[in-house]
Image (tube, helix red, strand yellow):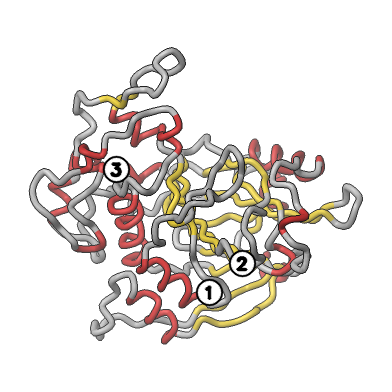
Amino acid sequence: MSEISSLLLDAHEKPPIDLRRTFKVLQKCTEQAETWQNDVCDLSDFKWTNSFHHSRTLDSQTLQEAFSHMGWDTSDEETCLQSLQVFEHNALPGLHIVAGLLPEETQVQLVNRLLHRDLADERHKTNVHNHYQVLYVLAESLSGSNAAGGVTEKSFFNTPPSTGEVLSPVDSTTHKPLSYSSFLQRKLRWVTLGGQYDWTRKVYPEEQPPAFPKDLELFISTCFPEMKPEAAIVNVYTPGDTLSLHRDVSEECDRGLVSISIGCDAIFMVGLANGEGEETTSVGLRLRSGDAVYMSGPSRYAWHGVPQIIPNTCPGWLCDWPALSCKGSDDSDVERFLPWKGWMQNKRINLNIRQMKA
């Protein structure tokens, strides 16, 4: 499958009916259900280890270099990084899992960059732009700058949710004004970095995209040197949200896809059609905060989606973000972002990175 050009695949094609059925089952099942126990793979449960084999190791030196690009203090003698094993699924070749790739500090630094700096960069389009006029003046700092932990002076979280500001609709005949609180709490679903993917036409525009954030590029390429980060989609989920089954086939190369999870646990479904018939192979993975997935080889063009976000599973140390006082964040952030304290407690952030061209 990896030799098949993405040009031969239709981005608008519907997934096989068998995979759609499995997706619906995973969407509705609970942790107590037999389906969950039998079909949701959890790498923290020893019983699933036979479904994977060791494919490679990320040694401590590689990890230290990768995390240094995200602000990791390599001179801290108290910090000791252990090598991490990468596992590949036996029935889905090319589907690699790195459980707990990101330590707590790096998760905070990554969220800071994505949701403060990158969201506030008006070159990075969001789903909200389709129907509303996004007021970037509301991202300006109210009290100077702060670059600690990846936080820049610009952030939409500078403006409290109680503000009377609203986002005006592009077309007032079809949409009502959007409150600022609703914009960040519920309406924001994605933001694009680097290549600005057109979700309607499912293509990358021909014009030159904004540069991919350099620190993220170096971090990802150090961990996954087989691909060059050129575009990313940051998905923002709340329990009840889903991401339908799809394939990423708009890129002009078959280099692997990297997916990183932060916040609430999610069920991530991956499936392949076996030949021309409807027979399929699929797996439901429970992904936790800090986990990474690398889809390459036959799994590069696998169907994948998110049938379920599991509520109340955000790690306790992360729940108060952005008003977070911990290593990887600045103490002044607590007061600065206090009106938004707890925003992260029922959220899942997924960073999906891809290479656009060979």
* Image mark for residue 320: none
Q: To which residue does mark 3 refer?
A: 342
Q: To which residue does mark 2 refer?
A: 256
Task: Tell whether 296 sits left or right of 151.
Answer: right
What's the residue type where badge 1 is placed? Answer: Phe
Q: Is residue 37 visible?
A: no
Task: Tell whether 270 sits left or right of 176.
Answer: right
Around disc 2, counting alpha carbons within 10 Å, would you say few (fewer than 14), some (14 to 19), or many (20 or more)?
many
Residue at (49% x, 58% y) in the render:
231
Q: The C terminus appears in which quarter of the rendering? A: bottom right
> Which residue is nearer to you in this view: 197 or 287?
197
What's the residue type where badge 2 is placed? Answer: Gly
Report how far apart the C-alphas of labels 1 and 3 lie in the structure. Answer: 32 Å
What's the residue type where badge 3 is placed? Answer: Gly
> In terms of sequence position, does the residue under pointer 1 or pointer 2 come before the other?
1
Q: Is residue 260 visible?
A: yes
Report how far apart the C-alphas of labels 1 and 2 lie in the structure. Answer: 9 Å
Around disc 3, counting alpha carbons within 10 Å, would you say few (fewer than 14), some (14 to 19), or many (20 or more)?
some
> Which residue is nearer to you in this view: 203 or 43?
203
Occupied quadrant, residue 249: bottom right
Q: To which residue does mark 1 refer?
A: 224
| Outermost residue to the right | 277
Looking at the picture, does residue 249 appear above or below residue 109? above
Residue 50 at x, y percent in the picture: 72, 71
Looking at the picture, does residue 43 appear above or below residue 273? below
Task: Tell whether 9 sits left or right of 279.
Answer: left
Residue 180 at x, y percent in the picture: 28, 29
Report how far apart the C-alphas of labels 3 and 2 lie in the structure. Answer: 34 Å
Residue 302 at x, y percent in the picture: 71, 56
Q: Are marks 1 and 2 in contact (CB under 8 Å)?
A: yes
| In front: label 3 or label 2 | 2
Q: Could you say whether the residue bearing mark 1 is in a helix, strand or loop? A: loop
